[in-house]
Image: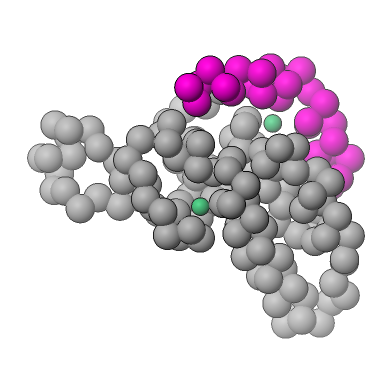
Amino acid sequence: MLQKSAMERIMFYVQVHSIEMRNDLDDAELSTKNIINFYCQACRYSVTDERGLLKHIISEKHVERLHFLYKTKYIRECIKNNVEIQPSTILNPMRMYRDLNKIVCFGNSKYACSLCFENNIVGESVLIAHCADSKHAERKRGLPEILE
Ligand SMILES: [Zn+2]
Ligand SMILES: [Zn+2]
């Protein structure tokens, strides 16, 4: 699960889940207490440990909000750029390929996997292959332990 480096994981939280890193403490306090404040912009939810953050980003409430935001953004971009909206990419995958809230859909067949910290999964077939992969399945099995 946490095989990715801290930097990679943080990039993932920021880029995929719109998590803001906030510190209200000064540098000296931060280095002694080692506290990071994660703030979820979509839910206005704040948490200070990574385990709590992981729990949050795979919760149904968070994923619903996130998908709503990305769906809205995708539709807006289509209108702005005068391209046809692909209903299948914004409607079906939201539920069909969510894999118990592990998968984030950006619209236009672009996905990310919160379990593997994998961004830029492009195309439904690639996503299906990803979810069927043994590494993904292994992480999924190990998740309850990490979240305990
Ligand atoms: Zn959230
Ligand atoms: Zn995965």
x, y percentage for residue 96? Answer: 84, 46
**What residue sits 45% from the left and 40% below the top?**
53
Picture quadrant where residue 106 is located: bottom right
Classify the position of ligand 2 by quadrant: top left, top right, bottom left or bottom right. Answer: top right
**What residue sits 60% from the left and 17% below the top?**
142
Tell me if residue 145 is in the magenta stretch: yes
Please determine whether, in this image, residue 35 is positioned above or below residue 94. Answer: above
- Identify which residue, 122 or 16, lies in the foreground: 16
**What residue sits 56% from the left and 51% below the top?**
62
Relative side of 143 to 81, left or right: left
x, y percentage for residue 137? Answer: 73, 21
Dominant SS type (magenta): helix
Q: Is residue 23 visible?
A: yes
**What residue sits 66% from the left and 63% below the top?**
68
Picture quadrant where residue 72 is located: bottom right
x, y percentage for residue 120? Answer: 69, 45
- Identify which residue, 125 or 81, lies in the foreground: 125
Q: How many marks?
A: 0
Please determine whether, in this image, residue 142 is positioned above or below residue 118. Answer: above
Colour convention: one colour
- Identify which residue, 79 or 55, lies in the foreground: 55
Tell me if residue 34 is in the magenta stretch: no
What span is colored magenta in the figure?
123-148
Quadrant containing the N terminus is top right
Please determine whether, in this image, residue 50 is positioned above or below residue 110. Answer: above
Q: Is residue 113 visible?
A: no
Please determine whether, in this image, residue 42 is positioned above or below residue 21. Answer: below
